[in-house]
Image (tube, rainbow, N blue to C red):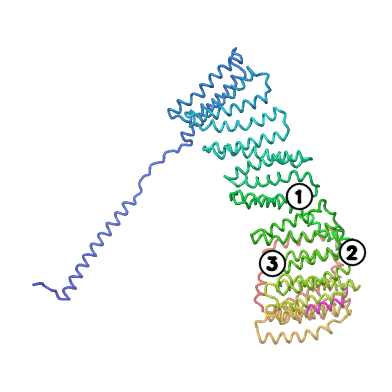
Amino acid sequence: MTHIPSPAEELRLLDAELRQLDARRSQLLARRGWLIAALQVPRPVPAAAPRPEASPPRVQNVLLVLGGVLLTVAAMAFTLVGWGQLGIVGRSAVLAAVTVAALAAPLPLLGRGLRSTAEAVAGLGLALTVLDAYALHRVALDEVDGVGYAAAATAVLAGLWTGYGLLPRTAALRLPLPAALVVAQLPLTLWAFAAGAGPYWHAAAALATAALDTGVALRAPARSVRVVAAVGAYGMGAGGALTAGGLSWTATGPSAAARAAALLLLAALVALAAARRTATVPAPAAGVLLVAAAAAVPRVVLPAVWTVPVYLLCAVALLAVVRMPRVPEPVRRGLVLASAGVQALAVLWAARVVVATLVGPLAWIGRAWEGAPSDARAAVTAGTPWPPYAETVPLVLAVVAAVLALTPRPEARTAAAVPAAATALVFPLVLELPYAAGLLVACAVAALALVSGRVAAAPLALVAAGHAVLLALASRSATLAVLTALTLLFAVAARRRALVAAPAALAHAAGLACAIGAAAGWAPEHTAPLLLVVPAAAVLLAGRVEAPARVPVEVTGAAAALLAVGLSGTDPSMLALVLALCGVLAGAMALRPDRRRLGYVSAALLVLAAWVRLAAWEVTAPELYTLPVTVPALVVGALRRRRDPRTSSWTAYGPGLAATLLPSLVAAWADPHWTRPLLLGLAALSLTLLGGGHQLQAPLLLGGAVLALDALHELSPYIVQVTDALPRWSLPALAGLLLLLLGATYEQRIRDVRRVRDALGRMN
């Protein structure tokens, strides 16, 4: 029978098993800790062997190169200057035998796997063939021209080295083929020198050599050969292309231009062949060369004024080649880049006329309303000369604008507006159209730029409008008409484009107000109130336009108000009126929740207007006018602080105190008696004590400043007497002593200033 324990007995058995497991677990953990500690004992690391500074292959190559160089130098010395009584013939025979041995030696070396040694010996053999050629010239061909013989010798050496490098048993050598390609750069150029050929043949020789290098670079399997061929192609091709370009530019007849064009076409074909593999440089260069080749003959046949248009039209025609379906994509991109570069150069050439068009009318600022000029060009050339060869500038700009407009990319179409606007502005000047036509065209450009609705057209509208205003300064009627038209134009456009049009409308309205005052014969101070119409319009407009346009509108209105203040500065009465009106406008602007701080500006302007008015009336007792304002202002400030204790003392008491203290201080400085300064000093002292007692900044600082200035006014006569009584050396001495004292107590003063600043900061 199976024994089934009771629950109590089963629980006892389970507890016993768990105690045994805990004991076993403790033993295993202790063993584990010991094993970890044993494994973490540091073991001595053997010192690393010193790393060699030069690897064996590198040492081997250096030794082989040095040996080959030394043997070559010895062979040259042997051939040129010595070896006993053998003579040149004997030396040539010995040298030929050594050359054959040097060229044959790499074969067994390659068979034994000594490739580097074989390369060094092969290099020595190639160098010896050059000496053999020299010896042959000295022995048998001494009467042959040296340059011609060098041309033939380099051609033969290039062929021999190429054949040597292509032999089945020497094909593993890497030196002969690149060396043959280097020597192959010389034969054609040397033949041109030997034949006394002109620059056309020299350019042809360089381009033919570049064509050979290009073919090798495109087809050679070895990388070293391709690198040497590419360097030669770039060098010889650049030299030949630059020579052909110079010949094309200096050609004076169709025949010379046609020959230069043929050379440029050859260079372009070589570059196009290279562009099929790499289009980084060859493809754009090929495009430029094609343009130069196509324009070479027309440039000579046509008048000089058509030079730039001819090149530009050829560059545009290049874009038609780009659209051909069989043109590879890398070549297509390079040709487009070349066409764009030529067009950019044409625009840069035309920019001088555009700059003269925009800058020339600035001369009318100092000669306004002298009378309408005879034509549009005369209005521009009043202060600057007219550039030469400007007759075709509109054509150049129009062609570039058309190309950009027909480009499928959106940014190009947007940029087309710039040369199009420049074409319109320059066109009346080139044709010497009437003065009124130039004004109409400038205004029309501004209108079209605004109507287009594009963001990039806004600067064009502003530039065209500014150009029209400067042109209009020559005539009174033109100035009024243009400013009126532009003000209305920008005002209408402000409904759709307030960010640019609204400030521009206000600026032109300000100019119109000044022009109306000048045309009516008003003095500047009498024109100022009319000018304040612009800030008033800005106040009304700022609350209706979208948020991004508010700040430009407000800044324009503030600038117009500042101009009005400047115009009225010579007449105190008119200045007081203008300041008061500006204060009213600032108060109206402060009604908006986001411009509450302008209320302080409004109060300051109104107080300043009151002071200027008192000065204009020559009031000797300003307190009679300021105290009736100060007392209610202080009462209102006190009530506000009682309602809101956090209100600053500058807000509550500052305007009221300043309204009386500052005019009284000015009057006290001009008063020769002692009564007013005394009363002002007592009042300022009282304010200072009250401000210090109640810890209020505004009474403390305003009262203290007025008290100090009033005391300085009273002590100034005595200071002058003391200064006159002292010797001349005493002032520098006192100044030096003062500086020493200040330097000695500088740190203490800084601490005191900080303590006062903290105390003032704790005040309300």
Q: In which quarter of the image is residue 234?
A: top right
Q: Nearer the viewer, residue 685 or 60?
A: 60
Q: Nearer the observer, disc 3 or disc 1?
A: 1
Label 2 sits on residue:
372
Label 3 sits on residue:
454
Rendered position, 253 above or below 537: above
Label 1 sits on residue:
308
Characterize the local packing of mark 1: few (<14), some (14-19) or many (20 or more) Cα atoms within 10 angstroms. Answer: many
Image spot of residue 559 (x, y percent): 78, 71
Looking at the rendered structure, the secondary structure element under dot 2 is: loop
What whole-number distance in Å separates the C-alpha atoms at marks 2 and 3?
34 Å
Image spot of residue 131 (x, y percent): 59, 22
Q: In which quarter of the image is residue 464?
A: bottom right
Q: Nearer the viewer, residue 574 or 463?
A: 463
Is residue 33 toward the left or the right of residue 446 in the image?
A: left
Amino acid type, mark 3: Arg
Per the image, is 580 magenta?
A: yes
Q: In which quarter of the image is residue 200?
A: top right
Amino acid type, mark 2: Ala
Looking at the rendered structure, the secondary structure element under dot 3 is: loop
Is residue 242 toward the left or the right of residue 181 in the image?
A: right
Residue that protrudes farthest toward the left in the picture: 1
Rendered position, 89 above or below 540: above
Q: Nearer the observer, disc 2 or disc 1?
A: 1
Range of magenta residues: 570-583
Q: Do the residues labelled 3 and 1 touch (CB within 8 Å)?
A: no
What whole-number distance in Å separates the C-alpha atoms at marks 2 and 1?
34 Å
Q: Which of marks 2 and 3 is nearer the N terminus?
A: 2
Is residue 149 toward the left or the right of residue 660 in the image?
A: left
Residue at 75 percent of width and 42 percent of height:
249
